[in-house]
Image (cartoon, rainbow, N blue to C red):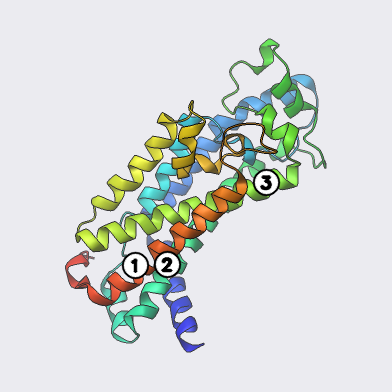
């Protein structure tokens, strides 16, 4: 129980440093700009139709493969300084076991991913609040943009997937998109951390995680290739429901994510216990 408490303290201590980390604030501002750019056309169409839109925009935010890259890249900047060692962390590391410290860093990675995607989800509502009205279903605006071929769909940056509207309720789509995004973001963070520690450099992890993000765009048109592209699993239109496509199922995705998390976490804890982390200290 004590080791769990120590691990949580390590994770929370990393979060506290966000207040003075200008990189974090810049990323949040840029993310808000991205969201505004890619959702404003839907608000414009709602004004034209004189109908409020439903608040369920998040599941469609990065269904497009190129837009997905823009929303995944900030994770690389959030985790680029893994294993998150500075002068403050040295004092913490001296007062706790390396295993507890390593677990704390893993917890921090997933806390960061959860905060980031919760922020993204919330901003799709906040930035369009004037044109949003709560409703249990998808709403007429999203339905029209998804199923209509009339000119109003042109210029809308966010692609409203008919597949998601047909096979998922708003609650299901919001939950699974958030969950899969958080798991994927956490795995990218673990990959960056593990690669950086094992290679004793801060570029290897970024390169590997960046490759996986680019791979999701490169394999977007190939259903079978989606099975080996974990970043692609963050969007529900790339998952199979009822064996209607050759895309991976949600069960497969959750199982694969779990296995990757376990393997990467074990590697990180073992590496943290054995490696000389002194060479990874960044100047502050």
Query: Residue at 52% of width from left, 30% of height from top?
Result: 223
- 156 lies above or below 99: above
Q: CA distance from mark 3 to mark 2?
A: 25 Å
Query: Residue at 65% of width from left, 44% of height from top?
Result: 126
Q: Which residue is mark 3?
A: 174
| Mark 1 in CB contact with mark 2 (< 8 angstroms) | yes
Query: Residue at 44% of width from left, 55% of height from top?
Result: 187
Instruction: Tell me where residue 224 appears, x and y as whole percent.
Output: 49, 33
Local packing at callout 1 (Cα closer than 10 Å; few below 14, some 14-19, many 20+) is: many
Q: Which residue is mark 1?
A: 268
Q: Earlier in the sequence, mark 3 or mark 1?
A: 3
Q: Nearer the viewer, residue 64 or 270?
A: 270
Query: Depth-wise, is mark 3 or mark 1 nearer the camera?
Result: 1
Q: Secondary structure at mark 2?
A: helix
Q: Quadrant of residue 144?
A: top right
Instruction: Tell me where residue 93 appears, x and y as whole percent.
Output: 31, 80
| Mark 3 in CB contact with mark 1 (< 8 angstroms) | no
Query: Residue at 56% of width from left, 25% of height from top?
Result: 157
Q: Which residue, as the protein is rendered here, is positioned at the far top?
A: 151
Q: Secondary structure at mark 1?
A: helix
- 235 lies above or below 42: below
Q: CA distance from mark 3 to mark 1?
A: 31 Å
Q: Which residue is mark 2?
A: 106
Instruction: Tell me where residue 131 appears, x and y as whole percent.
Output: 73, 34
Is 169 displayed left or right of 223 in the figure?
Answer: right
Q: Is residue 17 visible?
A: no
């Amino acid at each position: 129980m004590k080791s769990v408490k120590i691990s949580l303290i390590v994770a929370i201590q990393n979060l506290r440093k966000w207040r003075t980390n200008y990189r974090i604030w810049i990323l949040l501002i840029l993310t808000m700009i991205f969201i505004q750019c890619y959702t404003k056309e839907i608000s414009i169409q709602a004004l034209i139709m004189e109908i409020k839109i439903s608040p369920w925009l998040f599941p469609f935010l990065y269904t497009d493969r190129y837009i997905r890259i823009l929303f995944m890249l900030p994770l690389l900047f959030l985790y680029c300084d893994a294993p998150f060692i500075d002068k403050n962390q040295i004092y913490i590391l001296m007062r706790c076991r390396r295993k507890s410290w390593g677990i704390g860093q893993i917890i921090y990675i997933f806390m960061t991913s959860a905060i980031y995607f919760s922020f993204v989800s919330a901003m799709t509502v906040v930035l369009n609040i004037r044109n949003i009205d709560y409703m249990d279903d998808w709403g007429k605006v999203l339905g029209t943009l998804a199923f209509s071929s009339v000119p109003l769909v042109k210029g809308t940056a966010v692609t409203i997937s008919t597949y998601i509207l047909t096979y998922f309720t708003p609650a299901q789509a919001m939950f699974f998109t958030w969950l899969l995004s958080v798991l994927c973001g956490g795995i990218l963070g673990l990959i960056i951390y593990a690669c950086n520690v094992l290679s004793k450099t801060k570029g290897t992890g970024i390169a590997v995680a960046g490759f996986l993000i680019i791979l999701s765009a490169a394999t977007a048109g190939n259903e079978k290739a989606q099975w080996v592209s974990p970043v692609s699993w963050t969007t529900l239109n790339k998952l199979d429901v009822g064996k209607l496509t050759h895309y991976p199922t949600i069960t497969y995705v959750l199982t694969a994510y779990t296995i990757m998390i376990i393997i990467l976490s074990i590697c990180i804890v073992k590496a943290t216990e054995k490696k000389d982390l002194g060479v990874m200290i960044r100047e502050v």
